[in-house]
Amino acid sequence: MKLDELLKIISKKTEKYVNQSLLAEALGITRQTVSNRIKNGSQVTVSELKRIEEFFNISLFSENDVNNGDVVYIDYYTDIFASCGNGNILFSDEKVRIPIPVALIGGFSKQKTYSMINASGNSMNPTICDSDRLIVEHWSGEQIQDNRIYVFCFNQEFFIKRLSKNLDEIIIKSDNPEYRVRTISGSTMNELTLIGKIIGIIKTL
């Protein structure tokens, strides 16, 4: 969740206008820091969300929000780590149902399926960092959108990378320049299984 989105939710919950100065007080940072983070599209961390709830004495994700359509429950696969590095193998499919604000889900549709997984590694820094929680819009057969971030399985390992598609190959890119661009082509393309597109990031640090 980005700070500007959080401001709107807090204002709605408290039924009063919450400005950057008050948000800065709640988070224990300066107003200028809040302003800079909003300009940079900075994500709010889980610990910051807890501070907000305590400071304003509100619940950001209540049952009423579900009834009003402001919050949706999705599956969170707590033990699934998709690699932002050299690949991680799926080792568990345990999951819990958690509430997520619809505002966090870009292009939300009731016809689509969403879930949450964990990121592992540093190849997508600074966009996605180790242990970030990622909201996934499940793939349903549509074309790959060039330069969007996807989670996919290749050789029984899960990855998070930017994908682009040419006629006869798929280009795999990392946001961290230390990692080289890779391609999948020919018969190996059959080994790639798209899981979904990353449409939300929840920072944990």
Image (cartoon, grey):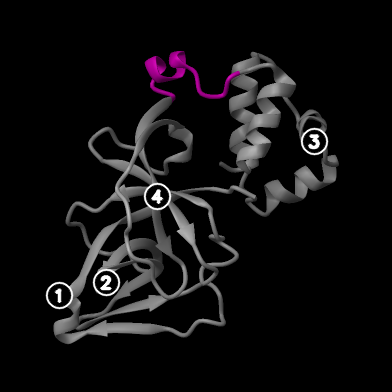
Residue under the point 33% across and 57% down: 91
Q: Are marks 1 and 3 in contact (CB under 8 Å)?
A: no
Q: Is residue 85 left or right of residue 21?
A: left
Q: Which of the two discs, 1 and 4, labels the residue nearer the N terminus?
A: 4
Name the foreground residue: 95 vs 12.
Answer: 95
Q: Which of the two discs, 2 and 1, labels the residue nearer the N terminus?
A: 2
Secondary element type, mark 2: strand
List the residue tagged with mark 3: 24
List the residue tagged with mark 2: 154
- Residue 57 against residue 110 in the figure, above or below: above
- Residue 26 against residue 175 in the figure, above or below: above
Q: CA distance from mark 1 to mark 3?
A: 50 Å
Res. 119 mark = none
Task: Indicate the amino acid at tag 4.
Answer: Asp
Q: Which of the two discs, 3 and 4, labels the residue nearer the N terminus?
A: 3
Task: Indicate the amino acid at tag 2.
Answer: Phe
Secondary element type, mark 3: helix
Q: CA distance from mark 1 to mark 4?
A: 26 Å
Q: Which of the two discs, 2 and 4, labels the residue nearer the N terminus?
A: 4
Q: Which of the two discs, 2 and 3, labels the residue nearer the N terminus?
A: 3
Residue under the point 36% across and 61% down: 150
Magenta residue span: 59-70
Secondary element type, mark 4: strand
Q: CA distance from mark 2 to mark 4?
A: 19 Å
Q: Which of the two discs, 1 and 3, labels the residue nearer the N terminus?
A: 3
Residue under the point 39% across and 71% down: 87
Task: Point out the frontmost of discs 2 and 4.
Answer: 4
Q: Are marks 3 and 4 in contact (CB under 8 Å)?
A: no
Task: Point out the frontmost of discs 1 and 3.
Answer: 1
List the residue tagged with mark 4: 79
List the residue tagged with mark 1: 190
Residue 199 in picture, x, y percent from top left: 41, 50
